[in-house]
Amino acid sequence: MKHATIFAAGLMALPAVAQDNPIDRIRPDAPELAAYGDHTIGVRTLTLTRPDVVDVVNSTEGEMVRYDRDITVEVFYPAADGTEPGGTYTAFLRDGETEVQLSGRAARDADVADGTFPLVLISHGYPGNRFLMTHLGENIASKGYVAVSIDHPDSTYSDMGAFASTLYNRPQDQSFVLDAMASQEGDLGGIIDASRTGLIGYSMGGYGALIFSGAGIEADGDWPDRYNPPGAILQELAVGADRLAEIQDDRLAAVIAIGPWGRNRDFWSEEGLGQIDLPLMLVAGSVDDVSEYPAIRQIFVETSGTTRHLLSFGDANHNAAAPMPAPQEAWEVEGIYGHYADAVWDTTRMNNILQHFTTAFLDLHLKGQEDRGAYLDLVEVSDDGVYDVAEDGTESDEHTYWEGFPNRTAKGLRFETLTP
C-alpha cells in the first residue's frame, strides 16, 4: 500500500537573501531551448512511503532490520492560467547545517493546469537533495512536464547514511517513485501521464538510472566493504537477478545520466550495460575525476543496445551542468563552494546548455516531437561548426553550426552519437 502526504507550505514573500540565490536565470547567450516555456509553474511537496524494505544502515549480517522508507519529493508542474509566478525554497547546503533560501518561478501549491503531461523523475547524487537541480525541474515543468525531484534517504546533505544504502536503494527508489506518482489521485494525479516517463540522474542518480533502465551490475564484483550491504542483498541488482527484473518498468521511455558513477569501480560489464534499450543521453565533464571521464566514455560505448548520445563539457569536472549555482552562503562556508561550482565553466551557462539539450531529448522521446531531432544531429565538436547565415536568416549549404546556439556561443563542447 503506497501513501502520499502533502505538506502544506504557503507561498513566501521574496526576502533580500533569497534574491541573491536565484535558480531560474537564463543568460542572454543561452541556446534556444533553454528558455522557460509557456506554462506558469506550480510546486508541491509530497512524502511517499516505500513500505517494509531493508534498513541498510541499521542491519547487520546477523540481523536484517526492515522499516518503512519515507521519501520526500518536490513536484513541479504546469499551473492553472492566472497563477502568479514566484516563490522560494528552503534548503540545506552541502554541510547539512547551513540553511539557505532559493528563489524561483514556481508558485507553492498552485492549482494545476488543464490537460495531462509526461512524468519526469530527477535523482540527485551522494550527497545531494531534491533542490540541487531545481533549475531543471522548474524549467521542464514550464514546458509541459510534471517533474518530480527526489530526496533519497541516507543520501542527503542532512542524512548521509551508509554509502551501501545508496548503492542498494537508488534504482529501487526511482522505480517506486514512478509507480507512486502514476498512482496519485486528486487534481495532481489527474494531470500526470506516466505512460512515457523520463528519468534524469546525476552521479549516484545516474548510477541508479542505468540500473533502473536495465543495466544489471556484476554478480561477482570485488568491491570495498563499505560498498556491500549486509546479507549480500546488492546481488539483487545483478545481471539476471529476479529483483532487477521486478523493478524494470515499460513506462520508462528515456534516460539522461549526468556524470554517472559506477563504471569507474567496475559495477558493470559490457554485458550489463548492453541490456539498456531505452534512448539514453550521457552528460559529463571531460576531466571528471569522481565518476572518471574515461569510465563514462566506457558507458557510452558499452550501452550498445540503444541509440545514445554523449554531451561533454571541455575541461569541466564532476559538477558539469547538474548542480544549481552556488548559493551566496556557499561562498562563506569553508569547503562548500566546490560542491556546486566548476573551476572553468560558469554554472548558469552549463545549466542553460543542459536545459536546452534536456528539452530537445525529452520532447523527442516523450512527446514525439520529431523536429527536436535537429537539435541532436550535430557536428561532433562544437568549435568545428561553421556559422553561415544570410541577413534574412537563410542558412547556406556550408552552415553546420549547432542548432539553436547563437553565433559565437557553441564553444568548448562535444556531442557524440552511437547507434546499436
Image (tube, rainbow, N blue to C red):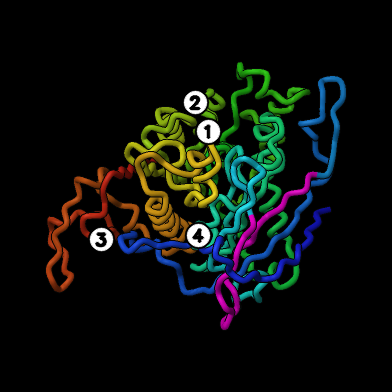
Q: Is residue 97 left or right of residue 317?
A: right
Residue sitting nearer the eye, 133 or 50: 133
280 in the magenta segment: no
| For marks 1 and 3 on the same chain, the one whose residue lies earlier in the sequence | 1
**Could you tell me which residue is drawn at 82 percent across and 23 percent down?**
60
Q: For marks 2 and 4, give the one nearer the viewer.
A: 4
Q: Which mark is residue 261?
A: 1
**Could you tell me which residue is drawn at 43 percent across and 57 percent down?**
355
Residue type beneath disc 1:
Trp
| For marks 4 and 3 on the same chain, the one whose residue lies earlier in the sequence | 4
* Residue beneath disc 4: 20
What's the CA distance linking mark 4 and mark 3? Answer: 28 Å
Circle 1 — which element? loop
* Residue beneath disc 3: 406
Circle 3 — which element? loop
> Compared to 273, does 99 lie above or below?
below
* Residue beneath disc 2: 264
Q: Which x, y percent locates residue 288?
A: 42, 33
